[in-house]
Amino acid sequence: MPSADVAFHRALVEAVLVGVATGLLGVQVVLRRLAFFTMAMTHATFPGVVVAAVVGVDLYLGGAAAGVAAALAVAALSRRRGHDPSTATAVALAAGFALGVVLLSAQRGFTRDLTAYLVGSILTVTTEDLAAAATVVAAVALSVAVAGRALTYTAFDRDGARAAGYRTGTVDLGVLLLVAAVVVTAVPAVGTILTVALVVAPAGAARLWTDRIGTMTAASVGIAVASTVGGLLLSRGWDVAAGAAISLTAAGCFAVSLLVGRRDSLLTRRRTRRPGRTAAPVAGRA
Protein backbone atom coordinates (compact mmCIF):
# COMPACT_ATOMS: atom_id res chain seq x y z
CA MET A 1 0.00 0.00 0.00
CA PRO A 2 1.46 3.38 -0.95
CA SER A 3 2.62 5.57 1.91
CA ALA A 4 0.14 8.28 0.91
CA ASP A 5 -2.73 5.83 1.39
CA VAL A 6 -1.34 4.73 4.74
CA ALA A 7 -1.18 8.37 5.87
CA PHE A 8 -4.73 9.05 4.71
CA HIS A 9 -6.12 5.96 6.45
CA ARG A 10 -4.38 7.00 9.66
CA ALA A 11 -5.88 10.45 9.25
CA LEU A 12 -9.35 8.90 8.86
CA VAL A 13 -8.93 6.92 12.07
CA GLU A 14 -7.71 10.04 13.85
CA ALA A 15 -10.68 12.00 12.50
CA VAL A 16 -13.15 9.45 13.86
CA LEU A 17 -11.45 9.27 17.27
CA VAL A 18 -11.26 13.05 17.62
CA GLY A 19 -14.89 13.36 16.51
CA VAL A 20 -16.05 10.92 19.17
CA ALA A 21 -14.00 12.61 21.92
CA THR A 22 -15.10 16.15 21.08
CA GLY A 23 -18.70 15.11 20.50
CA LEU A 24 -18.98 13.33 23.84
CA LEU A 25 -17.37 16.05 25.92
CA GLY A 26 -18.83 18.92 23.90
CA VAL A 27 -22.27 18.34 25.42
CA GLN A 28 -20.89 18.94 28.90
CA VAL A 29 -19.03 22.02 27.65
CA VAL A 30 -22.21 23.49 26.15
CA LEU A 31 -24.46 22.61 29.10
CA ARG A 32 -21.98 24.10 31.56
CA ARG A 33 -21.27 27.10 29.33
CA LEU A 34 -17.56 26.32 29.19
CA ALA A 35 -17.02 27.40 25.59
CA PHE A 36 -14.94 30.36 26.77
CA PHE A 37 -12.89 28.10 29.01
CA THR A 38 -12.27 25.76 26.08
CA MET A 39 -11.02 28.67 24.01
CA ALA A 40 -8.82 29.74 26.90
CA MET A 41 -7.43 26.22 27.15
CA THR A 42 -6.39 26.25 23.50
CA HIS A 43 -4.31 29.36 24.24
CA ALA A 44 -3.05 28.25 27.64
CA THR A 45 -1.36 25.16 26.16
CA PHE A 46 0.85 27.34 23.96
CA PRO A 47 3.64 28.01 26.52
CA GLY A 48 3.92 24.28 27.18
CA VAL A 49 4.39 23.69 23.47
CA VAL A 50 7.12 26.35 23.24
CA VAL A 51 9.00 24.93 26.22
CA ALA A 52 8.73 21.42 24.80
CA ALA A 53 10.04 22.60 21.42
CA VAL A 54 12.95 24.45 23.01
CA VAL A 55 14.10 21.57 25.22
CA GLY A 56 13.45 18.96 22.53
CA VAL A 57 10.62 16.88 24.04
CA ASP A 58 7.26 15.91 22.55
CA LEU A 59 5.15 18.99 21.77
CA TYR A 60 1.91 17.35 22.83
CA LEU A 61 3.38 16.32 26.17
CA GLY A 62 4.29 19.93 26.82
CA GLY A 63 0.84 21.08 25.76
CA ALA A 64 -0.83 18.53 28.02
CA ALA A 65 1.24 19.62 31.03
CA ALA A 66 0.37 23.28 30.42
CA GLY A 67 -3.30 22.40 29.93
CA VAL A 68 -3.49 20.50 33.22
CA ALA A 69 -1.77 23.38 35.03
CA ALA A 70 -4.24 25.86 33.51
CA ALA A 71 -7.24 23.69 34.45
CA LEU A 72 -6.03 23.40 38.06
CA ALA A 73 -5.42 27.16 38.23
CA VAL A 74 -8.87 28.01 36.89
CA ALA A 75 -10.52 25.53 39.25
CA ALA A 76 -8.67 26.96 42.25
CA LEU A 77 -9.41 30.58 41.37
CA SER A 78 -13.06 29.85 40.60
CA ARG A 79 -13.66 28.37 44.06
CA ARG A 80 -12.55 31.54 45.83
CA ARG A 81 -15.39 33.73 46.99
CA GLY A 82 -15.87 36.95 45.14
CA HIS A 83 -14.21 35.68 41.96
CA ASP A 84 -16.16 35.30 38.72
CA PRO A 85 -15.10 32.04 36.96
CA SER A 86 -15.01 33.85 33.62
CA THR A 87 -12.45 36.27 35.06
CA ALA A 88 -10.11 33.44 36.00
CA THR A 89 -10.60 31.91 32.57
CA ALA A 90 -9.81 35.18 30.81
CA VAL A 91 -6.65 35.56 32.87
CA ALA A 92 -5.58 32.01 31.95
CA LEU A 93 -6.22 32.73 28.27
CA ALA A 94 -4.23 35.96 28.14
CA ALA A 95 -1.43 34.93 30.48
CA GLY A 96 -0.92 31.55 28.84
CA PHE A 97 -0.62 32.86 25.33
CA ALA A 98 1.48 35.85 26.41
CA LEU A 99 3.88 33.57 28.28
CA GLY A 100 4.27 31.45 25.17
CA VAL A 101 5.11 34.51 23.08
CA VAL A 102 7.63 35.73 25.66
CA LEU A 103 9.35 32.35 25.81
CA LEU A 104 9.44 32.12 22.03
CA SER A 105 10.83 35.63 21.58
CA ALA A 106 13.52 34.96 24.18
CA GLN A 107 14.98 32.17 22.05
CA ARG A 108 17.11 34.10 19.60
CA GLY A 109 17.48 32.30 16.31
CA PHE A 110 14.80 29.75 17.20
CA THR A 111 13.07 28.87 13.92
CA ARG A 112 11.22 25.64 14.62
CA ASP A 113 7.85 25.68 12.85
CA LEU A 114 4.93 25.42 15.27
CA THR A 115 2.29 25.92 12.59
CA ALA A 116 1.24 22.27 12.68
CA TYR A 117 0.46 22.61 16.37
CA LEU A 118 -1.51 25.80 15.90
CA VAL A 119 -3.71 24.75 12.93
CA GLY A 120 -3.26 20.97 12.80
CA SER A 121 -1.58 18.49 10.46
CA ILE A 122 -3.80 15.44 10.44
CA LEU A 123 -2.08 13.76 7.50
CA THR A 124 1.11 13.42 9.52
CA VAL A 125 -0.39 11.62 12.55
CA THR A 126 1.55 8.66 13.90
CA THR A 127 0.48 5.44 15.56
CA GLU A 128 1.39 7.08 18.88
CA ASP A 129 -1.06 9.90 18.13
CA LEU A 130 -3.78 7.34 17.39
CA ALA A 131 -3.05 5.47 20.61
CA ALA A 132 -3.24 8.72 22.62
CA ALA A 133 -6.53 9.66 20.96
CA ALA A 134 -8.01 6.21 21.62
CA THR A 135 -6.98 6.47 25.28
CA VAL A 136 -8.66 9.85 25.68
CA VAL A 137 -11.82 8.60 23.93
CA ALA A 138 -11.98 5.67 26.35
CA ALA A 139 -11.45 8.00 29.34
CA VAL A 140 -14.16 10.43 28.22
CA ALA A 141 -16.63 7.64 27.38
CA LEU A 142 -16.01 5.93 30.73
CA SER A 143 -16.40 9.20 32.61
CA VAL A 144 -19.68 10.04 30.88
CA ALA A 145 -21.02 6.52 31.43
CA VAL A 146 -20.01 6.21 35.10
CA ALA A 147 -20.57 9.80 36.24
CA GLY A 148 -23.37 10.76 33.85
CA ARG A 149 -25.89 11.44 36.61
CA ALA A 150 -23.46 13.56 38.60
CA LEU A 151 -22.43 15.48 35.49
CA THR A 152 -26.02 16.26 34.54
CA TYR A 153 -27.07 17.10 38.09
CA THR A 154 -24.19 19.52 38.70
CA ALA A 155 -24.67 21.13 35.29
CA PHE A 156 -28.31 22.06 35.94
CA ASP A 157 -28.63 22.37 39.73
CA ARG A 158 -25.40 22.83 41.65
CA ASP A 159 -27.08 23.53 44.97
CA GLY A 160 -29.30 20.49 44.64
CA ALA A 161 -26.36 18.33 43.63
CA ARG A 162 -24.39 19.53 46.63
CA ALA A 163 -27.35 18.80 48.93
CA ALA A 164 -27.63 15.31 47.39
CA GLY A 165 -24.04 14.57 48.39
CA TYR A 166 -22.21 15.16 45.12
CA ARG A 167 -18.81 16.82 45.36
CA THR A 168 -19.41 19.56 42.84
CA GLY A 169 -15.85 20.85 43.05
CA THR A 170 -14.44 17.43 42.20
CA VAL A 171 -16.89 17.02 39.33
CA ASP A 172 -16.00 20.46 37.96
CA LEU A 173 -12.28 19.73 38.16
CA GLY A 174 -12.80 16.42 36.40
CA VAL A 175 -14.61 18.13 33.54
CA LEU A 176 -11.88 20.77 33.23
CA LEU A 177 -9.17 18.10 33.08
CA LEU A 178 -11.13 16.19 30.44
CA VAL A 179 -11.41 19.39 28.40
CA ALA A 180 -7.64 19.82 28.63
CA ALA A 181 -7.09 16.22 27.51
CA VAL A 182 -9.51 16.52 24.58
CA VAL A 183 -8.00 19.83 23.46
CA VAL A 184 -4.54 18.26 23.29
CA THR A 185 -5.95 15.17 21.56
CA ALA A 186 -7.58 17.27 18.86
CA VAL A 187 -4.33 19.10 18.09
CA PRO A 188 -3.17 16.78 15.26
CA ALA A 189 -6.54 17.21 13.54
CA VAL A 190 -7.32 20.92 13.88
CA GLY A 191 -4.58 22.45 16.02
CA THR A 192 -5.01 24.49 19.19
CA ILE A 193 -6.57 27.56 17.61
CA LEU A 194 -9.37 25.74 15.76
CA THR A 195 -10.16 23.10 18.41
CA VAL A 196 -12.85 25.19 20.10
CA ALA A 197 -15.05 24.99 16.98
CA LEU A 198 -14.91 21.20 16.96
CA VAL A 199 -15.70 20.94 20.67
CA VAL A 200 -18.53 23.47 20.80
CA ALA A 201 -20.20 23.50 17.36
CA PRO A 202 -21.41 19.85 17.16
CA ALA A 203 -22.84 19.92 20.68
CA GLY A 204 -24.38 23.34 20.07
CA ALA A 205 -25.97 22.03 16.88
CA ALA A 206 -27.28 18.91 18.65
CA ARG A 207 -28.89 21.03 21.36
CA LEU A 208 -30.91 22.84 18.71
CA TRP A 209 -32.56 19.52 17.76
CA THR A 210 -33.31 17.88 21.12
CA ASP A 211 -33.44 18.55 24.86
CA ARG A 212 -32.77 14.93 25.94
CA ILE A 213 -29.21 14.49 27.17
CA GLY A 214 -28.78 11.00 25.75
CA THR A 215 -30.10 11.93 22.33
CA MET A 216 -28.13 15.16 22.38
CA THR A 217 -24.91 13.30 23.14
CA ALA A 218 -25.48 10.79 20.34
CA ALA A 219 -26.29 13.58 17.90
CA SER A 220 -23.26 15.57 18.99
CA VAL A 221 -20.96 12.61 18.38
CA GLY A 222 -22.55 11.99 14.99
CA ILE A 223 -22.18 15.61 13.92
CA ALA A 224 -18.61 15.79 15.20
CA VAL A 225 -17.54 12.62 13.37
CA ALA A 226 -19.31 13.79 10.21
CA SER A 227 -17.46 17.11 10.52
CA THR A 228 -14.02 15.57 10.99
CA VAL A 229 -14.40 12.92 8.30
CA GLY A 230 -16.28 15.24 5.93
CA GLY A 231 -13.74 18.02 6.42
CA LEU A 232 -10.89 15.61 5.77
CA LEU A 233 -12.50 14.42 2.54
CA LEU A 234 -13.14 18.00 1.46
CA SER A 235 -9.53 18.82 2.21
CA ARG A 236 -8.33 15.95 0.06
CA GLY A 237 -10.69 16.72 -2.80
CA TRP A 238 -10.13 20.47 -2.91
CA ASP A 239 -6.50 20.48 -1.72
CA VAL A 240 -7.10 22.85 1.20
CA ALA A 241 -5.93 22.81 4.81
CA ALA A 242 -7.52 19.90 6.65
CA GLY A 243 -7.85 21.62 10.03
CA ALA A 244 -9.64 24.61 8.53
CA ALA A 245 -11.90 22.37 6.41
CA ILE A 246 -12.89 20.34 9.48
CA SER A 247 -13.63 23.43 11.56
CA LEU A 248 -15.64 25.06 8.77
CA THR A 249 -17.66 21.87 8.31
CA ALA A 250 -18.50 21.84 12.03
CA ALA A 251 -19.43 25.52 11.91
CA GLY A 252 -21.60 24.84 8.86
CA CYS A 253 -23.49 22.10 10.74
CA PHE A 254 -24.15 24.55 13.57
CA ALA A 255 -25.32 27.23 11.14
CA VAL A 256 -27.78 24.85 9.49
CA SER A 257 -29.10 23.72 12.87
CA LEU A 258 -29.41 27.32 14.01
CA LEU A 259 -31.59 27.98 10.97
CA VAL A 260 -33.83 24.89 10.84
CA GLY A 261 -33.37 23.00 14.12
CA ARG A 262 -36.43 21.79 16.01
CA ARG A 263 -35.61 23.75 19.19
CA ASP A 264 -35.01 27.49 19.41
CA SER A 265 -33.89 27.81 15.80
CA LEU A 266 -34.60 30.85 13.67
CA LEU A 267 -37.25 28.96 11.71
CA THR A 268 -38.93 27.70 14.89
CA ARG A 269 -39.04 31.19 16.35
CA ARG A 270 -40.61 32.51 13.17
CA ARG A 271 -43.32 29.85 13.25
CA THR A 272 -44.18 30.45 16.91
CA ARG A 273 -44.60 34.17 16.26
CA ARG A 274 -47.36 33.64 13.70
CA PRO A 275 -50.85 34.83 14.75
CA GLY A 276 -52.81 32.21 16.67
CA ARG A 277 -49.70 30.33 17.83
CA THR A 278 -47.98 30.47 21.17
CA ALA A 279 -44.59 29.12 22.03
CA ALA A 280 -44.66 26.17 24.39
CA PRO A 281 -41.96 26.22 27.03
CA VAL A 282 -39.35 23.49 26.72
CA ALA A 283 -38.04 21.94 29.89
CA GLY A 284 -34.65 20.28 30.01
CA ARG A 285 -34.72 16.51 30.49
CA ALA A 286 -31.99 14.29 31.86
Image: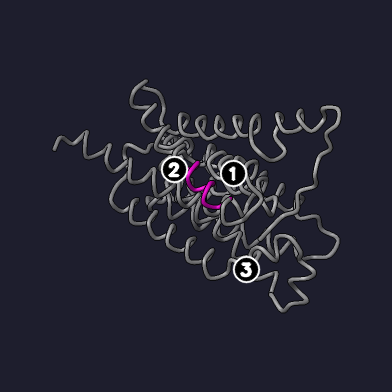
Q: Residue at x 56, y 61 (%)?
A: 177
What segment is highlighted magenta in the picture?
216-224
Residue kind at label 3, given as amino acid type: Arg
Q: Position of residue 143 (x, y in %)?
A: 52, 66
Within 10 Å of the Cα at label 2, are there few (<14), some (14-19), or many (20+) other Cα atoms?
Answer: many
Residue 124, compared with residue 266, is above or below; it is below
Q: For mark 1, what is the residue? A: 206
Residue at the far top: name it.
238
Give the colour scheme of this rendering: one colour
Q: For mark 3, what is the residue? A: 149
Spatial separation of the CA atoms under disc 2 and disc 1: 13 Å
Q: Residue at x 76, y 66 (%)?
A: 158
Q: For mark 2, what is the residue? A: 225
Within 10 Å of the Cα at label 3, are there few (<14), some (14-19), or many (20+) other Cα atoms?
Answer: some
Q: Is residue 125 left or right of residue 273?
A: left
Residue kind at label 1, given as amino acid type: Ala
Residue kind at label 2, given as amino acid type: Val
Q: Earlier in the sequence, mark 2 or mark 1?
A: 1
Q: Earlier in the sequence, mark 1 or mark 3?
A: 3
Spatial separation of the CA atoms under disc 1 and disc 3: 19 Å
Q: Residue 222 lies in magenta, yes or no?
A: yes
Q: Nearer the viewer, mark 2 or mark 1?
A: 1
Q: Residue 99 lies in magenta, yes or no?
A: no
Q: Is residue 38 left or right of residue 16?
A: right
